[in-house]
Amino acid sequence: MGAAAVSPALAQQSPPEDPAASEEARPATEAGDQPETTAPERRIADPDAPLVPAEPVWNTFHGQLNAQKYSPLTQIDASNVGRLELAWEYHTGDVSDGSGELPKTVWSATPVFANDTLYLGTPFYRVIALDPATGEEKWSFDSASTLKALSQPALKNRGVAYWEAESPVAGEPCQKIVYLGTMDARLYALDANTGELCEGFADGGILNVNKWNTTNTTFPFSLLQPPTVAGDHVIMGWAGADWQHAETPPGNVLSVDPETGELQWVFETIPREMWDQTGTANVWTAMSVDEGLGLVYLPVASPSPNYWGGNRTEPIPFATSTTALDIATGEPVWSRQWVHHDLWDYDTVAAPTLVDITVDGEEIPALIQATKQAFLFVVDRRTGEDVWPIEERPVPSGDGSVEGEVYAQTQPFPTKPPPLLDQAEKADIWTIADIVGFGGCSRLWDDLWYEGMYTPPTTRGEGTYTYPDSAGGVQWGGVAFDPESQTAIVNFSHVAQYIELIPREEFEELKEEREVAELGLHPQEGAPYGMQLRNALNWLGMPCWEPPYGELAAIDMTTGDIKWRGPVGASQKYGFYMPESMGSPTIGGPAVTAGGLIFIGASMDAKVRAYSLETGEELWSDQVEAPAVANPAVYEYQGRQYVAFAAGGNPILKDQVGDQLAVYALPED
């Protein structure tokens, strides 16, 4: 698909005063100074592939390439889930609380079930293959990677990816491959049966992805998210250091051959003429794929620096978007930009969930894109066109305090489903926190500038109130979907924060006075402003805004209406649990089953839970070692259904780390 095939949706996403989007992806054959690439000659995708696999599979990060996180298994259901018990557990040993020589670990790895094996990646960049019924180790592989915080404040891993040949040749090595990425930008290809390196892949089984990092090389192309494997393509984004630099590597997505590691195509998210001004707009999270349409869907992040855009005043149409590419060529088919001239770090954080829904009697192949803003945008996944109207609405401009900035006059707002959070006004103050804090919350609310959603950053007063911001709304766990009832399930956080831009000279002085991390200071080096991002808390660390702090909701995707919603998890402070009616901030996502169940960890209290899909009632829970911020995996082996949670923790929730894989099943009667 060339330029003529690009959907009109590409030209619809800039604010009205902006010129139409015209920058296109450069396919491999036109990549300029990009390395030589190979044209795909084998299978790309299966045009007959159903969106929902006929058999229960959990062989990718989100269970299936459609990112529905759905299992058709019914052995565990609402009538018996209360009997669920720990079938086995496994401890990787790869854990650090940051008190020693190693950085803290953040383990968010969804277990992958494939080849009659459960595969894990660890934050020490090892791969472990386990018997899915017993947890007995089959093999392990140690990449011996650098255990340093090269681009992130912690050692992070979200797991591994799996590929197998269309017709595996018995006795031949690497007909089935497990891929592991590392923070130092290496992609390892391992024989899925033995754990041995695949000698024919790149350099003896190791691909140095950083060889393609040639512009603004402020950090390596960290491979913390496992690649997306579709047909004969291994598709990679990368992660970097947010909030640190104005000029960073420009965002690109790379596709390589699964057996050789040869580059097939490159998609560039930022116009080349802007490469010396800005960067990122990368894809650091999971992607989704429609094999029938031959499209891969990219959730694209915001450009750098995150909270000041005076260096990038020209449109960057692919930034903070969902963009659909032809898997064969890497060319764009359509793109929808969810934030124009992003000044809030509103990265598109979750893989879009691909669904078939019936709206007003019409069968629609759709896509649900959840965002940090607590929006769910729903479009036709073939074209990017609205399912329910998405309106461009006026938003606040700046207050004149920020030098060089420009502001988008409008932003897109979905009309259905309704926003999961009310962003029209500041959240109500939690009276208890205000009283205990001697009125500090009320004073803070009075001092923060807010004119509704998309109020831009300021240098004045305490800064700009944001609800939600970087920690709020829907995170990378994304939306689960039950195709039978056409119900979407999503967890989201209520977190009020505030941003202040600090002139460079003042920032440098402030940075020298106190610990940067303690103050929430981030340099945005190369910009005239550093920035400070803080949660809105009283002096005791209590949230100033009213609970709940996290919720779980079900949305009827035939109407766009919310079926039910309620608090999820429990918050914890100084060792004390708050009432569950207050909920918990959440990281990680849900899984849904044909047994009428929702499984989720994701909460501060380090519990894993099952909820009724029909009513939202909590039906089961168990305590694990640390917050289970990984998406759960649901699989069947030798006639028994299992639910697996990686309990690794994340300091955004609380200071608790773990290395436990907890696997549950019904008792064997």
Image (cartoon, rainbow, N blue to C red):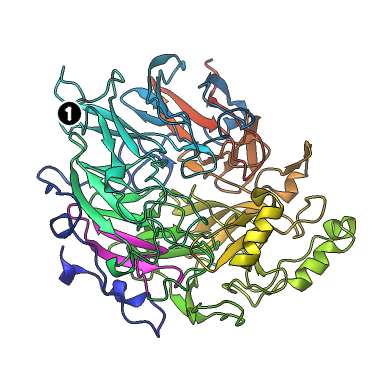
Residue 508 at x, y percent in the picture = 62, 60
Amino acid on which the number 1 mark rests in the picture: Gly
Q: Is residue 485 left or right of residue 435?
A: left
Is 340 part of what is drawn in magenta? yes
Is 104 situated above or below 26?
above
Asked if one can make out residue 499 in the rendered structure from this viewpoint, the answer is no
Is 416 situated above or below 569?
below
Q: Is residue 234 left or right of residue 137?
A: left
Residue labelled with disc 1: 200
Q: Nearer the viewer, residue 358 or 370?
A: 370
Q: Write the residue at 52% across / 60% down.
A: 524
Q: Which residues are magenta?
A: 315-341
Question: Which residue ends up furthest to the bottom in the rendered image?
Answer: 17
Residue 182 at x, y percent in the picture = 39, 36
Classify residue 132 by image quadrant. top left
Asked if one can make out residue 11 in the rendered structure from this viewpoint, the answer is yes
